Image (cartoon, helix red, strand yellow):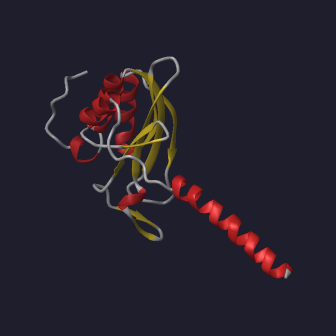
Amino acid sequence: MRMTALALLTLIVLIQCLPMSRAISSPPATQPATPEFDVIAKELGIDGTLADDVYTVTLTRSDLDVLHEDGPVPAGVLRTEFQFYRCDCGKMNVIGQFTVADYEANDVIDALRAGMIKVASVSPMLMNEHPRLLIVRFHGGGGSQHLAKTLSSALEWTGEARMAPATRPVR
C-alpha cells in the first residue's frame, strides 16, 4: 500500500511540473519586437533574436579556413555576437565580441573606439591555430542607430568586406 501511495504522489508531482518545463523551453522570437531593434537589424543587414529583453545578433566566420593541431575548426565555432538591451537610463547598450584574424584586430578596435565603444579585452581564441584568431570583447551605450553603424563599420574590416574596393576616407 505504501509503495502505491508513493508512486501516486510521484506521478502527481511530475504532472504538475510538465507545464512549467514547456513554458521555460519556449523558443525566442525571431524578429525584433520594437522599432529600436528594427533599426539595428536594418543597419546591420542581419535579423537577430529577442529573448529576455536582449536582442542578439550572431554571425559566423565562414570566410576563414582555420586549422588547429586537431584538424579543421568548424565555422560555427567562429562566432561574432552582439547583444543589445535597453538601460534604465534610456540608452541602448551593446555587449559582444568579434572573432577576428590577427591581422584584422587593430582595424576593428579602431572602428569600435571611433564610435565610442569601449574595448574590454583582446585575447587569443585558441592555441596553435592558423590563421591566428583573436576575440575582441567590447561594450558601449548610446542610440540604437549609432551603435549599429559603429558595429557595421567594424565589420567592414573583417572577412570579405575587408577585401572590397576601398571606399573609406583616408585617415
Q: Is residue 13 or residue 154 the one in the foreground?
A: 13
Residue 33's x, y, as percent? 35, 36
In this rendering, is residue 89 above or below 19?
above
Q: What residue is rendered at 28% in x and 29% in y?
A: 39
Residue 30's x, y, as percent? 34, 47
Q: What residue is rendered at 24% in x and 34% in y?
A: 42
Q: How many marks?
A: 0
- Split into 4 quadrants, where in the image is the N terminus? bottom right
In this rendering, is residue 159 above or below 3?
above
- Split into 4 quadrants, where in the image is the C terminus? top left
Q: Is residue 129 or residue 161 the one in the foreground?
A: 161
Residue 62's x, y, as percent? 30, 56
Q: What residue is rendered at 30% in x and 38% in y?
A: 155
Q: Decide if residue 14 is on the left or right side of residue 59.
A: right
Which residue is at the far top? 89
Q: Decide if residue 123 is on the left or right side of residue 48.
A: right
In this rendering, is residue 14 above or below 146?
below
Answer with the quarter of the image where residue 165 lies: top left
Which residue is at the far front? 1
Q: Is residue 155 or residue 8 the one in the foreground?
A: 8
Q: What residue is rendered at 19% in x and 23% in y?
A: 169
Residue 78's x, y, as percent? 40, 54
Answer with the quarter of the image where residue 142 lies: top left
